[in-house]
Image: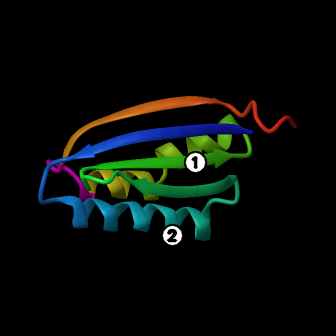
Amino acid sequence: MITLTAIIRCRPGTEDRVRAALAAVGDFAAANEPGTISFYVTEGEDGCVFVTHERFADRTAMEAHNAGTGSKGFFAATDGLLDGVEVVIGRETFPPA
Protein backbone atom coordinates (compact mmCIF):
# COMPACT_ATOMS: atom_id res chain seq x y z
CA MET A 1 0.00 0.00 0.00
CA ILE A 2 1.26 3.46 -0.88
CA THR A 3 -0.28 6.77 0.07
CA LEU A 4 -0.24 10.23 -1.41
CA THR A 5 -1.32 13.31 0.48
CA ALA A 6 -1.59 16.58 -1.40
CA ILE A 7 -2.05 19.95 0.28
CA ILE A 8 -3.69 22.16 -2.32
CA ARG A 9 -3.94 25.90 -1.81
CA CYS A 10 -6.32 27.82 -4.01
CA ARG A 11 -6.86 31.50 -4.60
CA PRO A 12 -9.68 33.16 -2.65
CA GLY A 13 -12.94 33.03 -4.56
CA THR A 14 -12.02 29.86 -6.47
CA GLU A 15 -12.98 27.36 -3.76
CA ASP A 16 -16.17 26.15 -5.44
CA ARG A 17 -14.42 25.39 -8.72
CA VAL A 18 -11.50 23.64 -7.00
CA ARG A 19 -13.89 21.64 -4.80
CA ALA A 20 -15.86 20.54 -7.88
CA ALA A 21 -12.68 19.58 -9.74
CA LEU A 22 -11.52 17.47 -6.78
CA ALA A 23 -14.91 15.74 -6.63
CA ALA A 24 -14.57 14.93 -10.34
CA VAL A 25 -11.17 13.31 -9.69
CA GLY A 26 -12.66 11.20 -6.91
CA ASP A 27 -15.60 10.13 -9.04
CA PHE A 28 -13.30 9.24 -11.93
CA ALA A 29 -10.96 7.24 -9.69
CA ALA A 30 -13.84 5.30 -8.14
CA ALA A 31 -15.27 4.41 -11.54
CA ASN A 32 -12.07 3.78 -13.52
CA GLU A 33 -9.08 3.07 -11.28
CA PRO A 34 -9.25 -0.30 -9.51
CA GLY A 35 -5.78 0.29 -8.04
CA THR A 36 -6.99 3.42 -6.24
CA ILE A 37 -8.10 2.02 -2.87
CA SER A 38 -9.48 5.32 -1.59
CA PHE A 39 -9.56 8.98 -2.50
CA TYR A 40 -11.06 11.55 -0.20
CA VAL A 41 -10.65 15.24 0.45
CA THR A 42 -10.79 17.44 3.50
CA GLU A 43 -11.21 21.20 3.37
CA GLY A 44 -9.49 23.63 5.70
CA GLU A 45 -11.67 25.89 7.78
CA ASP A 46 -10.72 28.96 5.76
CA GLY A 47 -11.88 27.28 2.54
CA CYS A 48 -8.70 27.96 0.57
CA VAL A 49 -6.89 24.75 1.55
CA PHE A 50 -7.87 21.26 0.44
CA VAL A 51 -6.06 18.08 1.43
CA THR A 52 -6.36 14.88 -0.56
CA HIS A 53 -5.90 11.54 1.18
CA GLU A 54 -5.16 8.92 -1.46
CA ARG A 55 -4.39 5.21 -1.03
CA PHE A 56 -3.16 2.95 -3.80
CA ALA A 57 -2.54 -0.78 -4.13
CA ASP A 58 1.05 -0.08 -5.23
CA ARG A 59 3.30 2.51 -6.84
CA THR A 60 2.18 1.50 -10.35
CA ALA A 61 -1.44 2.26 -9.44
CA MET A 62 -0.41 5.63 -7.97
CA GLU A 63 1.57 6.53 -11.07
CA ALA A 64 -1.34 5.52 -13.31
CA HIS A 65 -3.67 7.74 -11.26
CA ASN A 66 -1.27 10.69 -11.35
CA ALA A 67 -0.77 10.39 -15.12
CA GLY A 68 -4.41 9.56 -15.83
CA THR A 69 -7.43 11.38 -17.15
CA GLY A 70 -8.84 12.29 -13.74
CA SER A 71 -5.69 13.98 -12.46
CA LYS A 72 -5.00 15.69 -15.77
CA GLY A 73 -8.59 16.93 -15.80
CA PHE A 74 -8.16 18.40 -12.33
CA PHE A 75 -5.09 20.40 -13.30
CA ALA A 76 -6.73 21.57 -16.53
CA ALA A 77 -9.88 22.67 -14.67
CA THR A 78 -7.88 24.50 -12.00
CA ASP A 79 -5.29 26.15 -14.24
CA GLY A 80 -4.70 29.62 -12.79
CA LEU A 81 -6.74 28.91 -9.64
CA LEU A 82 -4.07 27.35 -7.42
CA ASP A 83 -1.51 28.99 -5.16
CA GLY A 84 0.46 25.81 -4.66
CA VAL A 85 0.43 22.05 -4.21
CA GLU A 86 2.59 20.15 -1.74
CA VAL A 87 2.73 16.37 -2.13
CA VAL A 88 3.85 13.76 0.40
CA ILE A 89 4.20 10.15 -0.79
CA GLY A 90 4.81 7.32 1.63
CA ARG A 91 3.88 3.94 2.95
CA GLU A 92 1.36 3.33 5.67
CA THR A 93 2.90 2.61 9.06
CA PHE A 94 -0.20 2.60 11.29
CA PRO A 95 -2.14 0.58 11.82
CA PRO A 96 0.40 -2.18 11.30
CA ALA A 97 -0.27 -4.50 8.39
Q: 17 or 35: which is nearer to us?
A: 17
Marked residue nearer the N-terminal end (2 or 1): 2
Q: 19 or 32: which is nearer to us?
A: 19
Q: 47 or 6: which is nearer to us?
A: 47
Q: Residue at x 34, y 56 (%)?
A: 74
Where are the magenta residues, as a range?
77-81
| Residue 7 visible, this orientation | yes
Q: Residue at x 60, y 71 (%)?
A: 31
Task: Please identify the residue farthest to the right as the structure is shown.
Answer: 97
Using the image, determine if residue 29 lies above or below residue 61: below
| Residue 69 visible, this orientation | no
Secondary structure category for the residue under label 2: helix
Category of crowding for the residue at label 1, using alpha-carbon neighbours closer than 10 angstroms: few (below 14), some (14–19), many (at least 20): many
Dot 1 amino acid type: Glu
Whole-percent x and y of residue 24? Answer: 41, 67
Write down the quadrant of residue 6 in the picture: top left
Task: Please identify the residue farthest to the front as the structure is shown.
Answer: 45
Secondary structure category for the residue under label 1: strand
Write down the quadrant of residue 29 in the picture: bottom right
Q: Residue at x 54, y 48 (%)?
A: 53
Report the magenta stretch's main SS: loop
- Residue 91 bears which disc, if any? none
Q: What is the count of numbered marks?
A: 2
| 74 part of magenta stretch | no
Dot 2 amino acid type: Asp
Name the residue that disc number 1 marks: 54
Name the residue that disc number 2 marks: 27
